[in-house]
Amino acid sequence: KQWYQRRVRGHPFDFESDTFMLRNIMEAPLLQFKEDIEDICISAVKEKDIEAKLKAVVSEWNHEELTFSLFKNRGELLLKGQQVSDIVSKMEDSLMMLGSLMSNRYNAPFKKTIHKWVTQL
């Protein structure tokens, strides 16, 4: 995905072509752009890490079931007591993780999703 964002000067990559091969990358003047390529690789690793952590938080909350108990004659309005401390602890952990992801400089592709989850929690 990172290669779509960059082109080596004078050497565009057509990844969608049926004839595209590793040879096409190797023919490019890569050594001239060593620093740019290193930056792309570092960004890709950092973004993959952010994506994995974000998926873990989302998965945890997508599978969370809240159980309510009756309150007088008004129906199910209260969370069951034994669950409250566990939920609050899990929420604090998730918000701390999301805050860390939000402040990460490599979060651009995930910023909207991270912000959405911060506001939802």
Image (cartoon, grey):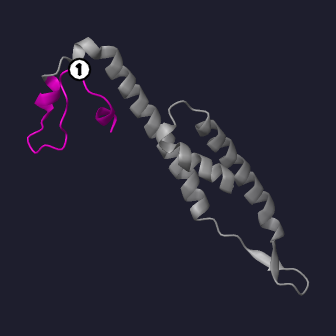
Q: Quadrant of residue 69?
A: bottom right
Q: Amino acid at mark 1?
A: Arg
Q: Residue at x 65, y 69 (%)?
A: 65
Q: Which residue is mark 1?
A: 9
Residue in the foreground of this view, choosing between 86 and 116: 116
Any magenta on residue 96?
no
Determine whether the residue tagged by mark 1 lies in a helix, strand or loop.
loop
Mark 1 Cα-neighbour bin, 10 Å: few <14, some 14–19, many ≥20: few
In this view, the residue in front, 111 or 22, is 111
**Relative image position of residue 38 (x, y in whole percent):** 35, 20
Q: Kindly identify the residue that appears in the image at 8 percent across and 41 percent down.
A: 19
Whole-percent x, y for residue 116 in the image = 60, 52
What is the span of residues highlighted in magenta in the rendered image? Answer: 1-26
Q: Is residue 111 left or right of residue 42?
A: right
Quick one: which residue is furthest to the top in this view?
Answer: 32
Residue 23 at what x, y percent from top left? 11, 29
Location of the N terminus by quadrant is top left
- Residue 69, placed above or below residue 26: below
Dominant secondary structure of the residues highlighted in magenta in the image: loop
**Residue 95: image location, x then y, percent:** 68, 46
Q: Residue at x 30, y 29 (%)?
A: 6
Q: From the viewer's perspective, tell me whether residue 109 is left or right of residue 19.
A: right
Number of marks drawn: 1
